[in-house]
Structure formats: structure tokens, C-alpha cells
Image: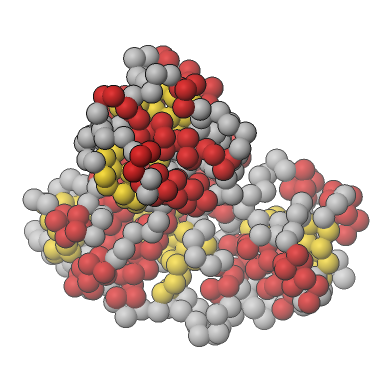
């Protein structure tokens, strides 16, 4: 029996007729395997198409009886004749395999769409809290999860962070709430999710090469609010997020909750005299407020920078929408510790701080990191993903001591600095040996940095041109910093005598 697109659209629930459904899974990373494993359990007829696969994952596919195709992907896909295609997040709509399926009228889902339809697997249907934004998603997801757990809820962070959503859905113990971090890629392929609460933290140009335009990227981010049932949380300091809420088709009764670092109005969460207060989730919100924490307390756990405070406010709004008590939010924040690669101080020596913010993979994130420090030697570059860096360079010039350019897209950065900061010392790391990139970065940075400066890795770009991922990039930076510190003769003393005579001398 051949299933029509309407038949496939009607498949909702673990007990639906998934058996025999012909499904092509595109990609075999963590997400692709979770999709294949889930659908194999449901009895679907599967083929996985990927450009590469490690031996262990390929062996696991064989164990669960799923066919893997690594060559002639387009002809193999057409010959298989799928009734549904499930894509890993990296597959853009313009990818030949995705374009073929779309042109053929075959439904194309992401793993999150599949997980939403299968969310009754454990018998306990968890609520979903959906989190997106150009920056701050992971920290906000982790903060929200910590607050929910402190409040006695069984919660887990999943999606674009932690484990795949399908793995969380299939956990036999079940959860009260899934805190789902969603990238714009995942949102593009999402059609039916109806979250308990949702947030778009901020909006700035990113991934334009994948989406094709700023409008398409905006639409993907804004879709997080669609069908939200209880609270659409938005950023009072970013009008675009408010506009996305206004445009969204939400469930009747859903509230708009603002967060910002100013004094909050009714239905907002914000700051009053350096105190984080809730004026959204209390009966007398027109005349009263509830204290959640203080800026001093946030600074004590590394959450005191402006963009981290914004993440705390958003997470607090989401947790309060789920009924978490103020005391539990405070307890969760006091126990919270930041992940690696997010404004992580690696070392302080001779009055110079070395900070790893490799997670700053776009200009918006890099700007937030740069604004946390007064005088910066900025390590920047990588894959710019079609995003213009001119505005970022212009806006942050006053904070910069020097710039160290890495990655393959250096020409755009070089031009931006020449136009907007022509007097700034700019050095380039031009080496074919990726193992030498960060040692050279550290040598250049140590030579130009002065007492009171921060050497900041905030690349404003993706990492895959020279590194495995942003974590690999950050780890190599941290390793190079520590290795240089363990060799005293290689360290400068923060005086003017350490300035290199030219970029080429250090390359």
C-alpha cells in the first residue's frame, strides 16, 4: 500500500500505522541515527543516505536492520521511492536530495517534527518548552532546565543541546517537561509543535547561506511561537522578537511576557535597583513584584554580564510560566555553572585575561562577548556563513587593542577593519597546518596585549574550515594558552617591548 502525503500527515502517536512506511533518512550524525533507530523500532522500511559514516554507527545500523547508502545518493533515493523524508538539521532546503523530495510532493520532516508526533511513547506526555534565538539558546535552555529541576519537575534539556529530542521522548521513565533548544534549521522543518511556552531570545542575521535570505531566517525563528499555549516570551530590548509574537498564530489565552534589563511593566520580568523581579506571574502584577535574585548573586556565579543577565531573565520567565517558585529559581541560579566555550576565563596572568567564547559563531554573539570587556585583543574569523561583519567591526572598534584574524574568510574581515579601523593593529594567521593556528594566535596575542587587556576568542564565525566544531576550536585555544603559560620564556610581560614588528614575523 502506497501512502499519500495526506496519509503521512495523519500519522500522530506511537500507536499510529508507522509499520511499512517507506522513509528515507538524510544524514547519519547523532540526529540521523536517533531517527533511524526510532523508525526501525516502529517497523518502518528505512534507508539512510549519507555522505559519510563512522564504522561504529554503520555497524549499529546493520544490527537494527537499516540499509545505509553512501554513494549515488540521488539515484538511490529515487529508486527507493520514499513516502516520507526525514532530514538532519544540516540539510538545507536547496540540497539536491531535499529539493528532489519537495518537487515530488513527498513530505519532508525534521527529527523534532517526528518527535512531537511520537511524544506519547513513554505513556507520560511531557510538556515542551521551546527555546530559540540567534544567541544564548544553550545557556537559556540549561538555566530553564535547572530551574525546573530545582522546582521538583522531571525535566531534561534536549534538541540542539544535550540529547536528540527523540531519545528524550523514548526515555522509559518519562519527563514532566522537555526543554527543547531549537536551531533555525530545525524550526524550518517543524510543522505541528504546540509548546507550553516559547521564546525567541534575540534576532540578528545568521545562516543566510543556509536559509537563502534574512526573511527566511526570520520566518524560521518566528515559527517557534506558532501554536504556543501558555506564554510567548520575548525580548523587550529586541523589537524584532516582539513583532514575531504579534505575527504568530497562538492558542487563545496565550500571554505575551517580556523580559529586559530595564524596569519591568506588568507582564514583564526585569531589573529594579539591580534586583531581578517578576511582574508577570503574580496576582497583583499591576502594583507588586516578586524578587527572584540580584545582579550581585549572578556575578558571583559568572552570570553577571549583560547578555547573561538577559538569558537569566528569559529562563526565569519560562520557569515561572511553568509554576516554579521564586525560591527554587534563586537556588538553581546559585548552583549553576557555565559550560565551556562561553565567555570562559582560561587564565589570568600579568594583568591579562584569556577568555574562550568559541561558541560566539556569529556577529551578534561576538558583539555580546566584546561588550563584556573594556580593552580586547580580538581573535576573530572562520566561516562567516554569508553574514556581513562590517557593522560589528564599526560598533566595537573603541574596545579593541588589536585583532588577530583566523580562518578562510579573512578577506571580508580584513576589508572591514581597513574601512572602519584603519589604525588598529591587525594580524593574520595564515598557516596550512591547523594544529599551528592557535599556537600562532597565542604568540601574536601575547606580544600585543597589555596589562588590563582581555584576549578574547569570539570568532563571529563557524569553525568547520579549520576545526571539527566550535568546541574543538575552543579547546585548542585553551590548550595553546596553557602551554604558552607553562613556558615562562615564551610569555611577554605586558609592556610595549613585546609588540611584534609585523604580522609576518609571527606567522
Query: In the figure, is residue 46 to the left or right of 352?
Result: right
Q: At 57% across and 54% down in the image, what residue appears?
A: 186
Pinpoint residue 87: horizontal percent, then vertical percent.
Answer: 68, 56
In terms of image quadrants, where is residue 129? bottom left
Q: Position of residue 42 (x, y in %)?
A: 72, 77
Q: Picture quarter containing residue 83? A: bottom right
Q: Is residue 380 visible?
A: yes
Q: Quadrant of the N terminus?
A: bottom right
In the image, residue 177 sits, relative to residue 276, either above or below, namely: below
Please name the colour scheme applied to the rendered image: secondary structure
* Nearer to us in this view, 503 or 144: 503
The residue at 56%/66% (across/down) is: 164
Residue 26 location (% of width, % of height): 73, 56
Q: Is residue 437 above or below residue 342?
A: above
Looking at this view, is 222 or 414 the one in front?
A: 414
Whether residue 4 is visible to the viewer of this picture, yes or no, is no
**Residue at 50 percent of width and 78 percent of height:** 125
Residue 35 horizontal side relative to residue 123, left or right: right
Find residue 224 and report its horizontal and vertical position in percent: 47, 54
112 relative to 326 in the view: left or right = right
| Residue located 49% across and 21% down the image | 504
- Residue at the front extreme? 489
In-front residue for pair 78/55: 55
Q: In the figure, residue 120 lies in which quadrant?
A: bottom right
Q: How many marks?
A: 0
Amino acid at each position: 500500500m502506497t501512502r499519500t502525503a495526506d496519509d503521512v500527515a495523519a500519522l500522530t502517536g506511537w500507536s499510529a500505522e508507522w509499520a511499512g512506511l517507506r522513509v528515507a533518512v538524510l544524514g547519519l550524525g547523532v540526529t540521523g541515527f536517533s531517527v533511524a533507530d526510532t523508525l526501525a523500532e516502529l517497523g518502518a522500511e528505512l534507508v539512510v543516505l549519507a555522505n559519510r559514516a563512522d564504522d561504529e554507527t554503520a555497524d549499529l545500523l546493520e544490527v537494527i536492520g537499516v540499509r545505509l547508502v553512501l554513494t549515488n545518493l540521488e539515484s538511490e533515493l529515487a529508486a527507493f521511492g520514499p513516502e516520507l523524508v526525514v532530514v538532519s538539521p544540516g540539510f538545507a532546503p536547496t540540497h539536491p536530495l531535499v529539493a528532489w523530495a519537495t518537487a515530488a510532493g513527498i513530505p519532508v520532516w525534521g527529527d523534532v517534527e517526528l518527535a512531537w508526533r511520537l511524544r506519547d511513547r513513554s505513556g507520560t506526555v511531557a510538556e515542551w518548552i521551546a527555546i530559540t534565538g540567534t544567541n544564548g539558546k544553550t545557556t537559556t535552555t540549561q538555566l530553564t532546565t535547572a530551574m525546573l529541576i530545582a522546582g521538583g519537575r522531571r525535566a531534561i534539556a534536549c534538541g540542539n543541546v544535550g540529547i536528540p529530542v527523540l531519545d528524550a521522548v523514548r526515555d522509559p521513565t518519562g519527563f514532566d517537561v522537555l526543554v527543547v533548544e531549537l536551531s533555525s534549521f530545525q524550526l524550518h522543518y517543524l510543522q505541528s509543535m504546540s509548546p507550553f511556552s516559547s521564546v525567541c531570545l534575540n534576532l540578528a542575521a545568521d545562516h543566510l547561506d543556509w536559509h537563502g535570505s534574512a526573511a527566511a531566517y526570520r520566518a524560521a525563528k518566528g515559527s517557534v511561537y506558532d501554536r504556543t499555549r501558555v506564554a510567548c516570551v520575548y525580548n523587550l530590548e529586541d523589537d524584532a522578537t516582539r513583532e514575531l509574537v504579534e505575527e504568530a498564530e497562538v492558542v487563545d489565552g496565550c500571554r505575551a511576557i517580556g523580559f529586559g534589563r530595564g524596569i519591568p511593566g506588568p507582564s514583564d520580568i526585569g531589573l529594579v535597583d539591580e534586583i531581578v523581579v517578576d511582574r508577570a506571574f503574580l496576582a497583583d502584577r499591576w502594583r507588586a513584584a516578586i524578587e527572584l535574585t540580584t545582579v550581585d548573586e549572578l556575578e558571583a556565579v559568572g552570570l553577571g554580564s549583560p547578555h547573561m543577565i538577559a538569558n537569566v531573565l528569559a529562563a526565569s520567565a519560562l520557569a515561572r510560566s511553568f509554576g516554579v517558585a521564586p525560591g527554587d529559581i534563586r537556588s538553581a541560579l546559585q548552583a549553576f555553572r557555565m559550560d565551556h566555550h562561553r565567555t570562559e576565563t582560561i587564565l589570568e596572568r600579568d594583568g591579562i585575561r584569556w577568555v574562550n567564547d568559541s561558541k560566539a559563531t556569529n556577529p551578534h554573539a561576538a558583539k555580546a562577548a566584546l561588550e563584556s570587556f573594556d580593552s580586547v585583543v580580538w581573535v576573530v574569523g572562520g566561516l562567516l556563513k554569508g553574514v556581513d561583519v562590517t557593522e560589528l567591526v564599526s560598533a566595537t572598534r573603541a574596545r579593541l587593542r588589536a585583532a588577530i584574524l583566523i580562518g578562510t574568510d579573512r578577506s571580508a574581515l580584513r576589508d572591514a577593519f581597513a574601512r572602519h579601523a584603519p589604525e588598529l593593529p591587525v594580524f593574520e594567521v595564515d598557516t596550512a597546518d591547523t594544529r599551528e593556528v592557535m599556537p600562532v594566535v597565542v604568540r601574536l596575542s601575547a606580544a600585543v596585549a597589555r596589562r588590563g587587556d582581555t584576549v578574547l576568542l569570539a570568532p563571529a564565525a563557524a569553525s568547520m574550515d579549520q576545526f571539527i566544531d566550535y568546541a574543538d576550536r575552543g579547546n585548542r585555544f585553551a590548550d595553546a594558552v596553557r602551554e604558552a603559560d607553562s613556558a615562562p620564556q615564551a610569555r611577554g610581560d605586558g609592556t610595549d617591548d613585546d609588540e611584534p614588528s609585523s604580522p609576518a614575523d609571527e606567522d
